[in-house]
Amino acid sequence: MSVAMVVFVVTGALAVLGAIGLIVAREPVHSALSLVLVMIALAVLYLLLGAAFIAAIQILVYAGAIMVLFVFVIMLLNAGVEVRTNVSRLAFWLGLPLAFLFLAEVVYSLTRHYSAVSAGAIAGPVPASTEELSMKLFTEFVLPFELTSILILIAILGALVLAKKEAS
Amino acid sequence: MVPVSYYILLSGVLFGLGVVGVVFKRNIITIFMSIELMLNAVNLAFVAFSREFNQLDGLVFVFFVIVVAAAEAAVGLAIVMVIARNRKSLNVEDVDLLKF
């Protein structure tokens, strides 16, 4: 087993464990911390795939900004232990077989279609450099890039309008 | 090296776990976090394919997915706060005005 394989197995297992922790935890804060674990594990996987810039913004934007926002809202709303109701038990017993069916289907279709394709493994000599990525971003994709600034502006305004206390 | 199918498999498992979270969890914030998990799983598939086919377009797409996810998180959490203020509860079963 090569070093890359060992790193992949360890971080992949961490990511799956974090995802399971997100589902199993009853406290929202524990779920949020599990999700941070998943995101950091995914950043390591991006580094393994040679996408250094994506790994960096994964840590900065996801694990940094978005998760801090989540934890902030959890604290602000004082979200406690999740309550169990009859409906949630029903959802559990109906949903568990369906969830496993869905997982099995995804795994089946992916392994069927990509076992043949991936025979060559990942051995591409050039890892995607940040320079090439930014060249592409500012030439070919410059219109969507500029449009995202408008999207973010609208998101800021929307969040402000929604969270504003109505004058009664 | 690691075959791309392993990455796709991990991505599929993470996406499935995200779906499980959306179906099982009753807390609106945790459901929202499960959606973020699904977005991350899709990003992993994008990066893996981008490496496999040696094309940068996948990475550009991941960049935009992350930007949109940030905007979505900001608006979504504002909606969560409004719901919590109006319903005095974070349980999704209390938000059923459109259900009959």
Image (cartoon, grey):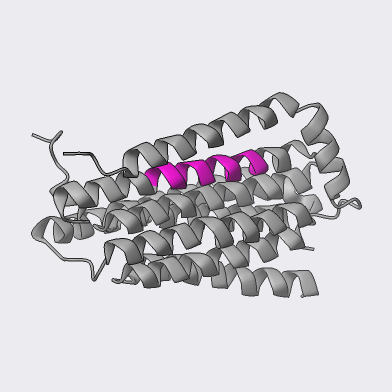
Residue A58, image x and y in percent? 64, 56
Q: Is B52 part of what is drawn in magenta? A: no
Q: Looking at the image, which is closer to me, A107 or A79?
A: A79
Q: Is residue A145 left or right of residue A110?
A: right
Q: Looking at the image, which is closer to me, A156 or A44?
A: A156
Q: Is residue A3 left or right of residue A42?
A: right
Name the quadrant of the C terminus of chain A: top left
Name the quadrant of the N terminus of chain A: bottom right
Identify which residue is drawn at 69% across, 66% down. Answer: A44
Above or below A73: residue A20: below
Identify which residue is drawn at 13% across, 37% down. Answer: B97
Q: Is B66 part of what is drawn in magenta? A: yes
Identify which residue is drawn at 52% across, 52% down. Answer: B12
Looking at the image, the residue that sits furthest to the front is: A167
Residue B56, image x and y in percent? 79, 40
**Does residue B74 appear in the picture of this structure?**
yes
Above or below A48: residue B53: above
Identify which residue is drawn at 34% across, 66% down. Answer: A75
Question: Principal SS element in the magenta part?
Answer: helix
Q: Looking at the image, which is closer to me, B59 or B55?
A: B59
**Does residue A2 appear in the picture of this structure?**
no
Q: Is residue A101 left or right of residue B10?
A: left
Residue B92, image x and y in percent? 21, 50
Which span of residues is magenta-colored?
A: B62-76
